[in-house]
Image: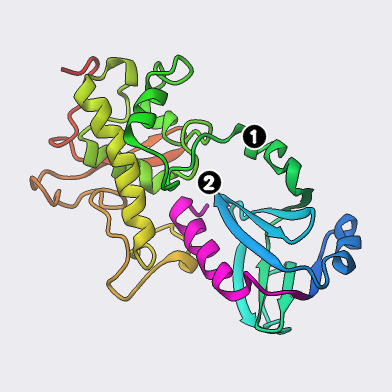
């Protein structure tokens, strides 16, 4: 599944194509959304915002579009009115005189009143978006100390979208490495300095990935989000099992935690219970 940086870059690309422009047409594959095809004609696209791993497209008037890529969904930009051949199933098309944006394969698509969108079952459970410019390390520290989260192992906590929205599997490994922490540690066992380091790295690593052109090639990663130009987000530990740590030359280890792969450097991220 794409993580927050990929969804935010997608939102930026889609916004550049259609925000500020009126819809000349709309298409929805789901039968219950068909009435909105005519209703949205002539509506201006006001904004396309990433919320964790979801997108909210806001139109002039009372409506907005909620979409979640899930595992297989993918947005594409095409010339106005074009429907490029694809083996994927087209779920949504929004056309303007300038360009069309097309959503393939995703099944989580809904139209909501703008003043009620925050009540969407997924959105109302999300924690702060890790890429929200207003999010501060101190706010993340406060969440780490919250009784809902402080007793959780970092391995599961960092993937919980109720804690921080947008963090996924590759970000988890990289955040823990740069924070010098182990996946089995818990916030309640960390020192103040460790909490601050974890909070800062959760934001900084995510921002660094967002600023890249995509993800550097790695096994098991969607080709749609990979960058082969040398400008991609490079991994220090993720997908590097058996290779030397870029900091200390120790051999990177891989573990399966909750059915998901997690990577660490045994020297930079020593195992242990209560931290000192």
**Magenta-highlighted stretch: main secondary structure?**
helix
Residue 124's disc number = 1
The answer to which of 73 and 122 lies nearer the viewer is 122
Q: Secondary structure at mark 2?
A: loop
Q: Position of residue 71 (x, y in %)?
A: 58, 53
Q: How is the image coloured?
A: rainbow
- Give the left or right position of residue 20, taking residue 132 as reference: right
The answer to which of 208 and 247 lies nearer the viewer is 208
Residue at x-position 44% and y-position 59%: 221
Residue at x-position 48% and y-position 42%: 129
The answer to which of 252 and 186 lies nearer the viewer is 186
Q: Position of residue 119 (x, y in %)?
A: 71, 36
Residue 264's disc number = none
Q: Quadrant of residue 90?
A: bottom right
In the image, is residue 266 above or below residue 27? above
Given the current orientation, which residue lies at the most extreme left position?
A: 248
Distance between mark 1 and mark 2 Cα atoms: 12 Å
Residue labelled with disc 2: 52
Q: Position of residue 37 (x, y in %)?
A: 86, 67
Q: Kindly indicate whether the residue at mark 2 contacts the one at mark 1 (C-beta within 8 angstroms).
A: no
Of pointers 1 and 2, the one earlier in the residue sequence: 2
Residue 251 seen: yes
In the image, is residue 274 above or below residue 130? above
Crowding at dot 2, Cα within 10 Å, few <14 / some 14-19 / many 20+, comes out as many
Residue at x-position 32% and y-position 42%: 173
How many badges with numbers are in the image?
2
Q: Position of residue 247 (x, y in %)?
A: 10, 48
Quadrant of the frame with the C terminus: top left
Q: Quadrant of residue 97?
A: bottom right
Q: Please state the extent of the stretch shown in magenta in the rendering.
A: 1-23
Residue at x-position 89% and y-position 62%: 34
């Amino acid at each position: 599944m794409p993580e927050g940086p990929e969804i935010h870059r997608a939102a930026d690309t889609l916004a550049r194509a259609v925000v500020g422009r009126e819809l000349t047409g709309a298409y929805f594959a789901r039968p219950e959304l068909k009435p909105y095809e005519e209703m949205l004609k002539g509506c201006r696209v006001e904004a396309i915002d990433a919320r964790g791993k979801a997108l909210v497209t806001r139109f002039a008037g009372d409506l907005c579009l909620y979409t979640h890529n899930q595992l297989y969904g993918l947005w594409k930009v095409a010339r106005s009115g074009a429907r490029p051949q694809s083996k994927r199933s087209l779920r949504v098309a929004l056309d303007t005189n300038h360009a069309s944006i097309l959503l393939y394969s995703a099944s989580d698509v809904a139209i909501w009143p703008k003043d009620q969108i925050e009540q969407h079952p997924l959105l109302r459970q999300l924690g702060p978006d890790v890429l929200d410019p207003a999010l501060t390390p101190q706010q993340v520290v406060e969440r780490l100390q919250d009784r809902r989260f402080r007793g959780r192992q970092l391995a599961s906590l960092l993937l919980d979208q109720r804690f921080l929205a947008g963090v996924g599997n590759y970000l988890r490994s990289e955040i823990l490495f740069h924070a010098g922490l182990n996946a089995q540690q818990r916030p309640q066992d960390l020192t103040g300095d460790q909490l601050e380091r974890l909070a800062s790295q959760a934001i900084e690593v995510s921002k660094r990935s967002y600023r890249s052109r995509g993800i550097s090639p790695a096994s098991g990663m969607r080709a749609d989000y990979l960058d082969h130009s040398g400008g991609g987000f490079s991994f220090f530990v993720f997908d590097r099992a058996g290779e030397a740590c870029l900091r200390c030359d120790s051999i990177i280890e891989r573990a399966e935690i909750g059915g998901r792969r997690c990577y660490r450097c045994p020297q930079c991220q020593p195992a242990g219970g209560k931290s000192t």
